[in-house]
Amino acid sequence: MRKPLSFVILVLSFWMMSSLAFASTLSDVKARGKLLCGVNAGLLGFALKGDDGKWAGFDVDYCRAVAAAVLSDPDKVDYVPLTTADRFDSLKSGAVDILARNTTWTMERETKTPFRFVGVSYHDGQGFMVNKASGVNSVFNLSQAAICFLSGTTTQANVEDFFREKEMTFTPVTYGTIDELVAAFQSKDGTKCDAYSADQSQLYAVRLKLAKPGDYTILPEVISKEPLGPAVRQDDEQWFNIARWTLFALINAEELEVRGPGVEDAKAKSRKPDVRRLLGLEGTFGVDMGLDADWAARAIKAGGNYGEIFERNLGKGSKLGIDRGLNALWNQGGILYVPPVR
Amino acid sequence: MIRSFIFAGLVIFSTAAHADTLDEVTGRGFIQCGVDENALGFAQQNDKKEWIGINTDFCRALAAALFGDSARVKFLPLTVDESASTLSSGDIDVLLHTAPWTMSRDTSLGLKFVDVLVFDDSIKPPHLIGPVVRQGDDAWFNVMRWVRAALINSEMLGITKASAEMATDVSEVKKVLGQQTGDDGNSFGQALGLSDAWAQNVIKSVGNYGEIYERNLGEGSALKKPRGVNKLAADGGLIFAAPIQ
């Protein structure tokens, strides 16, 4: 009696272990020696391949942090440029290990498709750009304005909802391509577009392409929330933990004032328990997710903490000049707050 | 050797036995919620032996989403020490405890935190309190994550306990209330394995996030704690959820 039972359990356990092993993205990445990161094919600030062939951007720096944590080398990343149409198929099929492609976290994407967002890396929102000469400095000055959109997106519906609620009216004008929209927005003959509405991160990027960027301003209000974040496949908790806690480590590092160039110094000198845990001097936090104690120190060294990554790619140190806004730490006027490494 | 294989097999087997919590809970007809034994504002029994608190109300919100009936909850009071093992063993379906979200609780116990329900700022820096589930059960994790999001989005959209059955032409509100499908023609409730009215049932029973906060921690409670960091992000606080879109 005992032998057949133990045999059944043995077979079952092998079968279940093999099905678990199938879902180990960490093993795949380690065996391959490269992280496959799905990114935007070319969006200034988020992911863009330079003339030197090197990728740069906010999403790219997240990929580099993950590669540093997992493979001990931030350069061991293959960037896979993806369109909005093929990004989810690529993640699902395993063509990429992680999707870091300025993608909005929505309910449909987590419940109707087998993806999991690990957190918010960038709080975006739909906004408006206007010519400074118009004197408009708030969305509430836009009643009866002609507002231009790219067709086939949800931007027009968002404005309709917002204006209806505020009992304001507007005239929608849609264009099929960004080039047409930009041309209409800059035209001098009359008022084809009093305002250009899109996600704020896109408005900042488009503004750089205008003939006189300094003539235009982006209004402070956002009328929709567009939380962007990295996504992984469901059914792989270890990989989810690695993706989640790499993002959290970068944000914790900013709060604890650990900077990329200062990691080794902090390791040598810091007496703060929070810093020592983050940098692997106390506890074995990375070990629980299949890494080692030094995982976060490597991730932070790769491109700096969250604030350094933001400023270099999107903020003051970049052409875009985007304010931290909601993306500042919770105690500096923003809403970024993550659980501690402890 | 064989013995250790058998042990490994049993461990993996028992984990797998709880891999479909949504089916189990639906079949059982009520949800089992682990809570603190006595935590003012979070989980406490009143004179009538009724559980009150923001954590117990989240459990009721889950019951409303699952069954259309917020009373279908069994509360299990637990100490911090027994809370994790009770969840691992399957004796509860979800843990709502004041033991805060940390990396070790999130990665080393086979459990994971869903998101933040309350920033407990009676301590500095604030502790993150939120629902915890077993790892490896994405369908159940989805229910937790999106019931929380429904509470928060409802406050943002002005959907209250009193107005949860209102007629509206705002598409974001219609999506929450189950009156409009997603782009693929399927309802949001269907995608969770629940009814179309899942979120409407939640708000009808327990109110939106702000109403729950005020009743248990804020103006309507003995604590009278200001919303502070627990205001919505749009109102200057830290409470945020992804959209029901």
Image (cartoon, coloured by chain):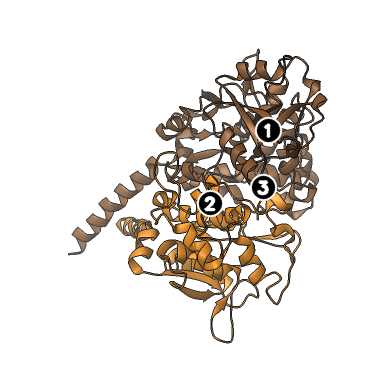
Chain colours: A brown, B orange
Q: Residue B14: x, y in percent?
A: 36, 61
CA separation in Å, label 3 and label 2 = 53 Å
Disc 2: which residue: B168
**For marks 1 and 3 on the same chain, the one whose residue lies earlier in the sequence:** 1
User: Is residue B114 something one can see in this rendering?
Assistant: no
Q: Which residue is mark 3?
A: A280
**Relative image position of residue A136 (x, y in whole percent):** 79, 32
User: Percent from the top left, x then y, of residue A124?
Assistant: 65, 38
The residue pinned by badge 1 equals A200
Vertically, is A221 above or below B42?
above
User: On the picture, is B69 further left or further right than A321?
Assistant: left
Residue in the image at 52% along x and 45% along y: B171
Chain where mark 3 sits: A
Quarter of the picture holding the N terminus of chain A = bottom left
Q: Amino acid at mark 3?
A: Gly
Taking depth in this image into account, of B13 and B19 the one nearest to the observer is: B19
Badge 3 density bin: few <14, some 14–19, many ≥20, Cα 10 Å = some
Mark 1 in CB contact with mark 3 (< 8 angstroms): no
Q: Could you say which is closer to the camera, residue B145 or residue B222?
A: B222
